[in-house]
Image (cartoon, helix red, strand yellow):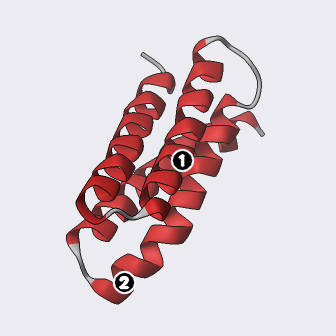
Amino acid sequence: MGLEFPSYVLAALTATGGIAGYARTRSKPSIIAGCAVGLLYALGGYRIQNGESYGVELSLLASTVLGGSSIPRAIRLQKPVPILLSLLATYGIATFGNAFRLTL
């Protein structure tokens, strides 16, 4: 089991979170951002699974986008959802960042 598994898990979690955020608050940015980041993770996982180029980079990009939006909110608001998203982003940045670093 390689890096495709964490990428698929993060895709499912972020897309599900975006859908849940929309269902709870009718927030269109939640569903758009959650599904867009989930799509990046899923595409990255697919490319990693098939040995294609830029899979790790796509998953790292998704983690960076997620972290860039959630970490400042987690620090400012101190609420569970942004904190959880920040933890997921940090895990993704560490996992895919390390894999990217090893390819250099």
Label whose residue precedes the other's in the sequence (2 or 1): 1
What residue is pinned by disc 2? 75
Q: CA distance from mark 2 to mark 1?
A: 21 Å
Amino acid at circle 1: Val
* Residue at 31% from the left image edge and 85% from the top image edge: 77
Residue 57 lies left or right of residue 72; in this view the side is: right
**Residues under numbered marks 2 and 1 in contact, where contact means CB atoms less than 8 Å apart:** no
Residue 100 pos. (x, y %): 67, 40
The 10 Å Cα crowd at callout 1, few under 14, some 14 to 19, many 20 or more, is many
* Residue at 78% from the left image edge and 40% from the top image edge: 104
The 10 Å Cα crowd at callout 2, few under 14, some 14 to 19, many 20 or more, is few
- Residue situated in front as seen by the camera: 3 or 65: 65
View extreme (front): residue: 26
- Residue situated in front as seen by the camera: 47 or 18: 18
Residue 1 pos. (x, y %): 42, 15
- Number of marks drawn: 2
Circle 2 sits in a helix, a strand or a loop, which is it?
helix
* Residue at 41% from the left image edge and 79% from the top image edge: 73
Circle 1 sits in a helix, a strand or a loop, which is it?
helix
Q: Is residue 83 above or below residue 54?
A: below
Residue 88 pos. (x, y %): 37, 53
- Residue situated in front as seen by the camera: 37 or 5: 37
Specify the label residue 37 is tagged with. 1
Say if residue 50 shows up in the picture: yes
View extreme (bottom): residue: 76
Amino acid at circle 2: Ile
